[in-house]
Structure formats: C-alpha cells, structure tokens
Image (tube, helix red, strand yellow):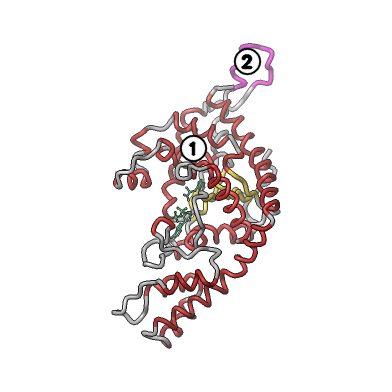
C-alpha cells in the first residue's frame, strides 16, 4: 500500500482565527521549506476537530477551515506535491483517538502542559480538551509519520504520540510472526487475526522545531498570540501593518527598541540589521518605518496569492477533496491493522 518510500511528514493547525506571522515563522514556514525539498511525503492538515473545542458555531467553523486551507496554499504549500486535507474528512482520526483513550490513564493526561495551564487558570475544560493529545497522537500515528514540524508549545504533544504508540505496541502486538493462510479451518481463524510484533506503529515520530524562531514575539514583546491581541496578521494590508508596528511599545531607556528589533530579526539577518540600528540609534520612528517597509515586501506576494484564492474558492475546495481521498486511503490501511490488533475484526 505504501508506494511512497519517503519518510512521512505531517503537521496541522487549528482553524481558530486569523493567522499571524507567529504562526508563519513558528510553524508554516518550515512546512513550506520542507515540502519544497521533496524529501518527505507531506500531509498538511486543517485540524478542525481540534478546533471544535474553541469554535462552536457552524458558519465560523466552515469559514475558518476553508480560510486555513486557503492560507496553506497562499504561503506556498502546493497540493500538486503534497496532501492538504481536513481532519474531519478522515473518520479514522476520531476512531483511533477513541482506541487510544481506552488505553490511557487520566493521571498521564493530567501531566499535559495545556491541561495544567487551563487548570491553573481555573478554566472549566471540556473532555475534548482533556483528550486533545490523544486525537493529535491519532493524527500523527495514522500515517506512520516520522517528522512533525511544530512550534515549541507542541513538543510535548509529539512526545505523547510516541508514548502512546509504544503503549499500543506493548499491549496489542503479540509477537507472532507467521500467519496461516487457511481461513477454512476454524482453529486457524483466530491465528489469522493475530498481529505480528511491530506491525502496527513501527515509526516513532519526532518533533521538528526551528530553534532560532522558537517563539515569535508580538507587538508587546510577549509571545505573539491571537488571544493576546498583539499580532501582525499574516496577510495584513499595508495599513494594518503600519498601524500594528506603530503601536509597538518602545522602551526609551535602551538604545535599541528591542520589540521592534525582535520582529525585524524574523525578516533580516543580524549582519543586515546591526548597521541599520546603529545608523538610527534612538530614532524609533525611522526604525519602525524600515520594519514596515520590510514587512510589506515580505507579506505582499503572499497576500496577493491569498486574495486570488479567496476569489476562487473552488480551487481550494477541490484540493481538499483530493487530499481527503489520499489521506483516507492511507489512514484506512493503517486502521485495518489497528482493528485487527485490538480484536474488533
Ligand atoms: P495562537 O497562540 O495565536 O492561538 P495557535 O495556538 O493557533 O496560535 O498556533 C498555531 C501554530 O502556530 C502552532 O503550531 C504554534 O506552535 C504556532 N505558533 C503560534 N504562535 C506562535 C509564536 N508566537 N511563535 C511561534 N510559533 C507560534
Ligand atoms: N495541536 C496543534 C496546535 O495547536 C495542531 C495539531 C493538531 C497538530 N494535530 C496535529 C500539529 C498533528 C501537528 C501534528 O498547533
């Protein structure tokens, strides 16, 4: 079944709102670079079932999901060379998540950072949020994924996927390596359904995090996040870029406005920036203007592609449709082994 010999790369983003340059530099850019190298068989997912923990309005869900797929294509992920799909189009994700939920203990899931953060904030979290790491483990393990490019905050989730794969293998792989081909003998029937050792989750995934941009700062110096209102939208117009950069709070005590510099560093090397910041020492307006010009240059081509696709949604819908077909084929092949391993077939 697996005709593509390249290692599988899979990543996903939840369609929960407007994408910002933190999402791009922390997660999307490396997807684009990695997919261009052609070394991996890439699966890029719209994690809509993960988003259901946050987006509980059908119209918003539809729009945000299509918008994320549009954004994937606008930043340079090409459906002709990789698989772009929606998680909910592949029912195997939720099926495998249930199986994982059945073999996972609550104390183990309670150690997840995301759960602990929510608890510390006294949020009344849903069961879906609590089980979030196991749906993500299913996303990853269904495709024999080796590489998972993610932001620093997602590293623990990839470790959960590894642990879950190992636990599943320990529990369900019997170690029998030879199987009979005689379905007519009832005694042989059971043997037919035994799964050879390491037939199920043989590939353990690794997270791939770009260290130099592990966390992209927002306009206030904190982590850029839509929940902090400190973002620069990925497809921002020149007006919005200007407004956001002008709103950066600069600390007048230092010579270099660190919040401006940190964002600028995403676009230019230190060698290019040091002379510029030296030349305009203390002149924050000039430095902000330079950053606005560089951001506009960087964003404009992506923004154009994005607007073009927005006007032609059929192109995106077709890509999702094709992606779902391919993803379902691969996921179903894995599920038939999983179902045999747990004994439901
Ligand atoms: P937000 O914090 O705005 O809600 P999400 O949690 O939806 O962003 O993040 C989607 C992806 O983008 C994740 O892979 C996450 O690791 C990455 N990401 C989000 N914000 C940043 C940031 N400030 N720096 C680096 N990566 C980020
Ligand atoms: N949890 C990821 C995030 O919040 C999104 C995600 C869902 C994902 N499933 C995945 C990322 C599988 C990588 C692989 O950003």
Whether the magenta-drawn stretch holds residue 188 is answered as yes
x and y percentages locating residue 172 in the rendered image: 50, 28
Left or right of residue 175: residue 287: left
Q: Is mark 1 within 8 Å of ligand 2?
A: no
Whether the magenta-drawn stretch holds residue 98 is answered as no
Picture quarter containing residue 344?
top right
Left or right of residue 316: residue 164: left
Is residue 262 shown above or below 151? below
* First to last magenta residue range: 180-193
Residue visible at 38% across and 46% down in the picture:
114
Is residue 164 shown above or below 310? above
Query: Between marks 2 and 1, how big is the CA–CA gap?
Result: 28 Å
Along the line of sight, which residue is nearer the eye, 334 or 64? 64
Which SS class for mark 2?
helix
Left or right of residue 8: residue 224: left
Is residue 99 shown above or below 255? above
x and y percentages locating residue 175 in the rendered image: 53, 28
Q: Quadrant of the N terminus?
A: top right
Q: Is mark 2 within 8 Å of ligand 2?
A: no
Along the line of sight, which residue is nearer the eye, 148 or 179? 148
x and y percentages locating residue 51 in the rendered image: 49, 45
x and y percentages locating residue 338 in the rendered image: 56, 30
Q: Quadrant of the C terminus?
A: top right
Along the line of sight, which residue is nearer the eye, 181 or 144? 144
Which SS class for mark 1?
helix
Residue visible at 55% across and 73% down in the picture:
296
The residue that label 2 is drawn on is 188
Along the line of sight, which residue is nearer the eye, 149 or 178? 149
Picture quarter containing residue 250?
bottom left
The residue that label 1 is drawn on is 165
Is residue 216 shown above or below 136? below
């Amino acid at each position: 079944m697996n005709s593509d010999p390249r290692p599988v790369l899979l990543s996903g983003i939840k369609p929960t709102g407007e994408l910002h340059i933190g999402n791009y530099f922390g997660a999307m850019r490396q997807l684009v670079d990695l997919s261009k190298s052609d070394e991996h068989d890439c699966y890029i997912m719209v994690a809509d079932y993960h988003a259901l923990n946050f987006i509980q309005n059908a119209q918003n869900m539809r729009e945000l999901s299509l918008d994320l797929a549009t954004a994937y294509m606008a930043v340079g992920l090409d459906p002709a060379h990789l698989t772009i799909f929606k998680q909910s189009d592949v029912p195997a994700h939720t099926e495998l998540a249930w199986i994982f939920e059945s073999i996972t203990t609550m104390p183990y899931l309670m150690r997840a950072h995301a759960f602990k953060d929510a608890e510390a904030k006294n949020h009344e979290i849903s069961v879906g949020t609590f089980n979030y790491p196991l749906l993500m483990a299913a996303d990853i393990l269904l495709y024999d994924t080796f590489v998972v490019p993610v932001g620093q905050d997602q590293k623990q989730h990839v470790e959960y996927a590894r642990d879950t794969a190992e636990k599943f293998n320990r529990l369900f792989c019997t170690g029998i390596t030879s199987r009979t081909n005689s379905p007519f003998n009832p005694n042989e029937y059971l043997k037919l359904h035994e799964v050879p050792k390491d037939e199920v989750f043989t590939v353990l995934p690794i997270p791939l995090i770009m260290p130099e941009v592990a966390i992209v700062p927002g306009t206030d110096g904190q982590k850029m996040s839509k929940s902090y209102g400190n973002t620069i939208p990925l497809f921002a117009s020149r007006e919005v870029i200007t407004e956001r950069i002008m709103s950066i709070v600069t600390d007048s005590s230092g010579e270099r406005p660190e919040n401006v510099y940190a964002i600028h560093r995403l676009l230019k090397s230190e060698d290019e920036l040091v002379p510029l910041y030296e030349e305009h020492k203390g002149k924050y307006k000039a430095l902000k203007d330079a950053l606005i010009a560089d951001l506009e240059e960087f964003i404009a081509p992506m923004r154009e592609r994005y607007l073009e696709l927005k006007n032609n949604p059929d192109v995106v819908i077709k890509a999702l449709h094709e992606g779902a077909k391919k993803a379902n084929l691969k996921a179903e092949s894995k599920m038939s082994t999983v179902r045999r391993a747990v004994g439901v077939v």
